[in-house]
Every structure is written in structure tokens, then in C-alpha cells.
Image: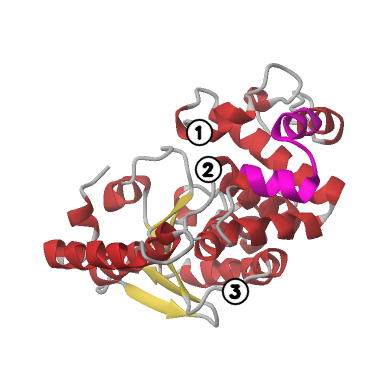
Amino acid sequence: MRDLLEMIPGGVPAVVGLVVAGLLLTTLPLHPQMWLYPLVRQAVELKIRYQTSDMLAKETPHFIIKYTEQDADMVDMVATAAEAAYKPVTTVLDYTPRGKAIVLIYPDRQAMKKAYGWAGDASAMGFYWGGVIQILSPKAWMKNSQAVEEFITTGPLAHEYTHLVLDHMARGNYTRWFTEGLAQYMEYKANGYEWITVDNRLTGKLYTMAELEGDFDGLPNQALAYRQSLAAVRYIAEVHGEAKLNEILRSVTAGQKVNKAIKRALGMDYTTFETMVNLWAKGHMKQYSKTAN
């Protein structure tokens, strides 16, 4: 992880200012870290805006798409997909972030990998970090890079925009499994897309909720961890209703931890929740089939 001084524009003076702000915020009665978090995110976003100021830009009603000349023929498709994600995500999450979200398009994987020290999955088509959505050019992974509907359905915009909206709502107060489960739920709900592989069947040995809440990114079978995260969110929304999912989101936004918010909304302890999710998932979610894939 890069040094905080490198992440924030202004170096030491900016960090000192944030520290002072943090000390002042500790006098507030509830969750001071949730007040400091947006300040750090905004500082990182400002640095990214500055570092990409020489890129071309296209504005839509809700997004600013930044790109290089190499992707001038891709920007309209990316803009269409971004706007297609906007209403479903903000409607389900019942929250609209202020201002326009920034989407950066990288022409190839090497450029995206170098971006701000990103060390994520080498096969990923995008990621959200520092208040900004950053995606790989459709040219780099689509067979037909002009297929708008395919990009809307299988591309990363709905997923990454969900991360952004939750991040603004909850101000960092969420677990990795919850944000990944919610992002996949929006992909599934808006576009019918599910990530199904031979490695993420839900009929074998599964991770516990404790493991998912621990080192999520360090779990050996990332496909399974992601699939189980989707199962948990789908269980909440489809069995208990989206009203309960929204209740959980409101509790998390108010500062309650995800596990406690789930317990409060669903009226069951976390062990029972884990058991019910696993039972439901085996009977209601698609499993990898060689003949179907």
C-alpha cells in the first residue's frame, strides 16, 4: 500500500490538516471515522483529477468520462453504459451521490495495472478506488468492441458504480464481502449477469461468514468468495425483500456494522443467517454446468 503522503495532494500540509480535522471530529458523539473518511476520499479524488487533467473528457448528465485519443471511438459506448447503470443503482440503493462521477478509461491492462499502484486481479475489467471508477478499454477484452448491449450487460460499469454509491452512502463503514455482494446483485438485477465458473459452485465446501469478513482478498478461491457474497445479498433481497436490504443499508449508513445491521433487520443471529444463506443458495442459484458453459 502506498504511503498516505503520496495519496493526498499537498503532501505533509494536507495530511496535517486532515489529522487536525480528525482530532476535531473525535469530539463528535458518533462515529468520527465516518466523518474523516470522506475527507480522505475527496483528497485522493482531487489528486486523480489533477493527474488526469491532460486526458480528453466527455460529460454526460451524471458522469465525466476521461480517456486517451486511443479510445475516442469507445467513449460514447462507455458513456451509454454508465448512464444505463445510474438509475437502477441509485433506485435500489435509494441514494444519489452529489456531483458527477469520474470514469477513467485505460487503453490496455498494463496502463490500468500501473494506475495509482493498483494491485488487483490482473483479469479485472475495472476497479473503484479513491472516489473514481477506473476501467479497461472495451477494445482490450471484447471481441466486438462496438457491441453496446454486450458492454452494458457484461462490462464493469454497473458493478463499479455500485461500489461508488455505497462508498458515498456508508463512508467506508462496510465489509468487503458486502460491497462485492451488493455490486454483483446490481449487475444481476439490472443486466441479468452472474459470474459463474467451475470454481464457484455453491454445493461443496464453502467459506464461513467469519472468513468472508476477515481477509476477503486473501482467500484462495476468489471466485467462490465473490459468489457467496452475491448469494448473501440475493438471499436478503429475494427472501426478506428489498425493503430489508434498504433497512440494512440505512443502518450501515448510520454507523452500525454490517453484521449487526443484518441481525437487526432480519431478526436472526449471524450463525443462523450463514446457515440460511447457504441452504437457500444451493436450491435457488445457478451452478456451473459443463454443458451450459
What secondary structure is marked by label 3?
Answer: loop
Q: Are marks 2 and 3 in contact (CB under 8 Å)?
A: no
Report the residue at 59% width, 74% height from top: 96
Q: Earlier in the sequence, mark 1 or mark 3?
A: 3
Q: Amino acid at mark 1?
A: Phe
Query: Label 1, on which residue?
Result: 216
Q: Magenta region: which residues?
A: 259-276
What secondary structure is marked by label 1?
Answer: helix
What secondary structure is marked by label 2?
Answer: helix
Q: Residues within 10 Å of mark 2 (few under 14, many from 20)?
A: some
Q: Amino acid at mark 3?
A: Thr
Query: Label 3, on which residue?
Result: 96
Q: Earlier in the sequence, mark 1 or mark 2?
A: 2
Report the residue at 67% width, 22% height from top: 206
Q: Position of residue 169 (x, y in %)?
A: 55, 64
Query: Label 2, on which residue?
Result: 176
In this picture, residue 204 sits left or right of residue 161: right
Q: Position of residue 274 (x, y in %)?
A: 73, 31
In this picture, residue 194 sits left or right of residue 222: right
Q: Position of residue 128 (x, y in %)?
A: 45, 55
Task: Say whether residue 270 is magenta.
Answer: yes
Q: Residues within 10 Å of mark 1 (few under 14, many from 20)?
A: some
